[in-house]
Amino acid sequence: MSEIRLFLLGAPRIERDGSAVDVDTRKAIALVGYLAVEAREFRRDSLAALLWPEHGTDQARGALRRTMSTLKKAMGGEGLQADRATVALTPGLVCTDAIAFRNLVDRSEAPFKDGDTEECLAVLRRALPLYRGDFLAGFSLRDSVEFEDWQYYQSESHKRLMATALERSVDCLTLKGSYGEAIEHARKWLSLDPLHEPAHRVLMLLYAWNDQRSGALKQYRECVALLDRELGVPPLDETTELYRNITDNRVPAPKSAGSAPEASVEIRDVRAPAPPPLVGRRSELEILNQTYSALGPSGHVVLIEGEAGIGKSRLADEVLKRVDSAGGRTAVARCHSEETRLPFGAVSELLRSTLETPDTAWLSDVPAHWLSECARLLPELLTIDPGISPPARGDDPGAQARFFEAIATFLTAACGGRAQGVVVVDDLQWADESSLDVLLYLTSRLVTRKLLIVGTFRSEEVASGHRVRRLLPSDRSESSTHIVLDRLSRAEVAELVGTVRPDDADLGDRLFEETEGLPFFVVEYLAALEHGADPASPKWSAPSGVRELLSSRLERLNATARQVLTSAAVIGRSFDFDTAREAGGRSEDETLLALDDLAAAGLVKEVGGGGAVRTPVFDFSHEGIRKLVLDETSTARLRLLHRRVAESLVRSRQRAGAEPGTVAHHYEAAGDADNATVYYERAGQRARSLFAHAEALAHYEAALALGHGEPARIHEAMADISILGGDYTTALARYETAAALTDQHDLVAIEHKIGVVHQRRGDLDAARSHLEVALELLDEDEHGRRARVCADLSLVAHRRGDGPAAERLAGEALTLTEKTDDVDARAQVHNILGILAKNRADISAAIEHLEQSADLAATLSDPTARIAALNNLALAHGQAGDGATAIDILQEALRLCAEQQDRHREAALHNNLADLFHRGGDRERSMAHLKSAVAIFAEIGSKESTMQPEIWKLVEW
């Protein structure tokens, strides 16, 4: 049996019996590395989806088989075991440096804690040489985000293990008095994280103990320069004090051999101050309690409205406390002003919040196919339950409806159980459009779901026609409650003030005058009083003085806490521990202690995370605090921190807030336009894949505004979206711009698209002209593309009444499809052949062609061709007198078209349905569809610079 060794720390390589094994594909390296580190068997489907996410299921499984064959052959037929369903490495046959390194570092812990320096060093001297570099250094799979996230996690994990090993070896060598060797290890430790001040301090001490006083002073200067260059901050007081002691020859004595190594930092149990009592909200709280208690088999939605600082969030928190005391589960999200263009940002937070409790047994109540859909937003579900299949591509017909239903089912199960749970969404005025789509879907279907949904929003930011207000169903008395909060009265402010200053009768009146009854301002004044503020002081001022009072609270922070708070403010209203730590450049212990201080000061609070699912998540106690911190930070430092936040999020794309739109925002704020445009484009692509067209356009606009390097591609993508909205004037302008900026080969596609737009508008001469240009630009051997252009030219000729030309062009297109496997082209050609046959009254031939077109189009990711074929097939059945079949087919086409959000064709389908219902004598349904058609046709016409009557005449396409 051969010895197979796998080296993953540093540049990856495989050895068999001491000789290098050549593997000619990166996927083979990725596969063997993943199997080795995870050390268990995997289902073939899971591995295929991990390594080939862009492929279809069959294609990905085929690629996996070929890669396994290559790998097995390279390893001499050994090491890899597989059956029809699973794949694994043969236990005990493949040795891996990463596993050996991890085991040795773990083994060093016991002797280190016991003070057995010799045993600890003996183990570490075997471990340290194994770490040749970062995990899979120089290796990546750009087409697999999930694998790159896994690789990044492994790299960071092993780097932390190396830091632990080096720190332990430094301690042990110091106890032995081996300062020279300790210095060598300490420098390696510092190289892993040059901003780690504890390592700088250890090196300074080691140099001093080794009679290298100049080296200690030089190390301090290196630390000062590095912190200033990278973070713009001075060293901690502890570091500066050590420097002064070394300068004055007052160096602390080294520990002697036999003493135990220093214990790790003790985490203090610091609790945030208790919130003031809820005053002036008794009736509103009673309404919420009664609503919760009376919840029947149907659900209920409660919207809490009011101005900023009025206490909406506090009232929603009381609901959460009531549900928590009853043993119910909750789903909670807070929307943020920076995330209005982040598709499904609020919904992602809602779903993720349900996984932050230890009890996730309820997941078994959610069917696996719905969990698979939810994994689009919660990729960690695939880790929690390996049996869940990765989500299918999201661009097939019905994808959006399935996606929304999966989210609704997930939340219903999450908030079910022995005691009813609740869904709370705070600050809905900042909800992204896609999250609102989901919430509207959910609130419109509460009659079949026992679910309480509570939302809050700011009155001043939500106008009467805003979509947030549509969350209240029309039958408000039965299924919804609307609560509008007012400011506190004089008596209520006096009651609240009395909880802090019961002996100061005049203070309540004074605070009422100065705060005008806004609860947040009152609470902030009370917090200042608790910290020693004097109402007689000149600093005591009118409501504008809230800012100064907040500043006085910030001034009490130490340097580390202030630095962490500034980094957190740049991240956003909510921030996670890891991003704050990486952006701030402080160690894990320093960041944790700083957050304890901030929580004790009431500036931030922990709101979730911290379990196996994700890093702890914190929130500013009020947006005003965050804005104040940002206002007091220099522009240069803000740009630096935005860059560090962006880079941190890029390194861990599954971290909360790591959506490409968020990354783009931080790069833009950092002044890095090149990276910002890249991520704005990615954000636009992701938004399109999630049917979030408004957000996609906003991201693309941002990319163009920052000078995207390939503007033609962005203009073309924006034009594609404008077509679906029926905004043909804008679409043509975008396409023309793209045409002016692109090369000849790409110009074919744009000319073709311009021709299609003119065809939709009814400008058939212009359509023919552009389609003929596209045909001339194509090479003779591009059979599929030529067939599609000929099919569209045939349709134009048909609409012009030129039957012979239409038949000739359709015949040419059919001949071309016989030379290609282009399914899209074949579907389009059979569609036009069906239209022409129907026009000749050859209904049987028309139905045959159109059914074939619909079947072919069903295999495509884009539903456009299938919608066209179904529409024309329905018209053929209607012409044959089979109205019932025609109506069924048209309703299916309408469903697909509504999901795709193609407004013009949606209007045409409504119009065709109105005609069919009218012929069948159903005047009521006919009129309903006719009204829908007229409304959409008018909407499209209003977007045209000049009204195009032909827009209203669209029947078949």
Image: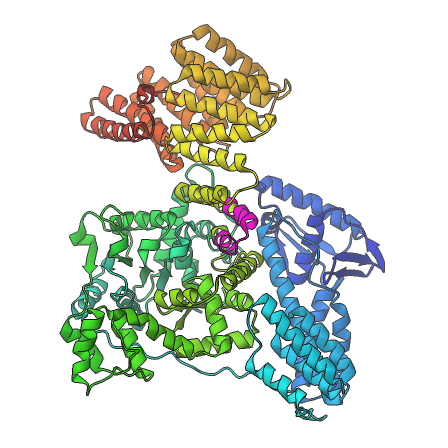
Left or right, 915 with respect to 2, comes to left
Q: Locate residue 289: give its quadrant.
A: bottom left
Foreground of the two, 824 or 259? 259
Q: Quadrant of the C terminus?
A: top left
Q: Quadrant of residue 888?
A: top left
Q: Splitting the image into 4 quarters, where does residue 251 fall?
A: bottom right
Q: How is the image coloured?
A: rainbow
Q: Considering the image in quadrants, where does the N terminus appear? A: bottom right
For residue 108, say whether it is visible: no
- Could you tell me residue 90's position as x and y percent? 72, 59
Q: Would you say 717 lies left or right of 178 here?
A: left
| Whether residue 67 is situated above or below residue 825 in the rendered picture | below
Percent from the top left, x then y, of residue 708?
54, 42
Q: Percent from the top left, x then y, of residue 775?
A: 56, 18
Instruction: Judge left or right: residue 469 versus residue 112.
Output: left
Taking the view exactly as shown, the residue that stands out farthest to the front is: 538
Query: In the picture shown, does residue 838 fall above or below 141?
Result: above
Dominant secondary structure, magenta: helix
Left or right relative to 123: residue 376: left
Please tell me whether residue 675 belongs to the stretch shown in magenta: yes
Residue 711 among those drawn in magenta:
no
Magenta segment boundaries in residue numbering: 663-681
Q: Is residue 613 above or below residue 601?
A: above
Would residue 97 be seen by someone viewing this image from the given angle?
yes
Q: Residue at x 48, y 60 (%)?
A: 656
